[in-house]
Image: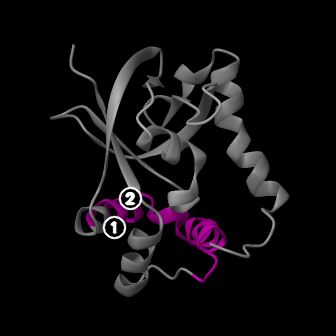
Amino acid sequence: MTGAPAMPRWLRSAFRVPDRLYRHGWGFLLGRRFLRLVHVGRRSGRRYATVLEVVAFDPAVSEYVVVSGFGRRADWLRNIEAGGPVEVTVGRATFPVEHRVLGTDEALGVFADYERRHRALGPVLRRVLSWLLGWRYDGTPDARRRLAEQLPLVGLRRRPG
């Protein structure tokens, strides 16, 4: 996503709402729709918090799937891949997690299901994705494959013990 235009003000404001809710103790109002990921900086050693939208949840294994909207260069993704401690808050529950990056084929299914479940938001979703990707996302299978290759999906599961 090199050379992406500046984020529109309305989008920047919309992205900040879930974070503000979590920071003020109201994150539980978001249910399982968003989670707060706390990670440690790979160089600084400082703790950071990032609020991410949950694009899928698998109750059989208690796995939350989130998308890295800024691709592989997202700091939170680089930090968790560096192996620092990671914890998640969903609603009022906080727990340590381990992560995995979904393969392209699995990600295709998750993205398709997400689009199906949020069909009414399709035009807004395509506009936001187009901005994040740096090219026009139209929801076709070819575009979805390109999306899955550019924006990794990350599964977060409660760490055993």
Q: Which quadrant of the figure has residue 152?
A: bottom left
> Above or below — where is 56 with respect to 30?
below
Question: For the residue carrying disc 2, how many other residues have a C-alpha within 10 Å: few (<14), some (14-19), or many (20+)?
Answer: some
Q: Nearer the viewer, residue 75 or 111?
A: 75
Q: Position of residue 14 (x, y in %)?
A: 72, 47
The amino acid on which the numbered mark 2 sits, given as a three-letter code, is Tyr
The residue at the point 39 percent across, 69 percent down is 148
Q: Which residues are magenta?
A: 109-136
Compared with 6, 22 (above or below) is above
Q: CA distance from mark 2 to mark 1?
A: 5 Å
Which of the labelled discs sits on residue 153, or is there none? none
Q: Circle 2 is placed at which residue position?
A: 114
Residue 41 within the magenta-colored segment of the rendering = no
Residue 127 lies left or right of residue 114; in this view the side is right
Find residue 94 and report its horizontal and vertical position in percent. Answer: 43, 16
Q: Main secondary structure of the magenta part?
A: helix
Question: Which class describes the residues within 10 Å of circle 1: few (<14), some (14-19), or many (20+)?
Answer: some
Whether residues under marks 2 and 1 lie with C-beta atoms below 8 angstroms apart, the answer is yes
Q: Position of residue 26 (x, y in %)?
A: 63, 19
Q: Which mark is residue 112?
A: 1
Quadrant position of the N terminus in the picture: bottom right
Residue at point 26%, 62% (across, down): 103
* Local secondary structure at mark 2: helix
Q: Nearer the viewer, residue 71 or 123?
A: 71
Q: Residue furthest front?
A: 43
- Which corner quadrant holds the C terminus? top left
Q: Please, which residue is most extreme toward the left here?
A: 60
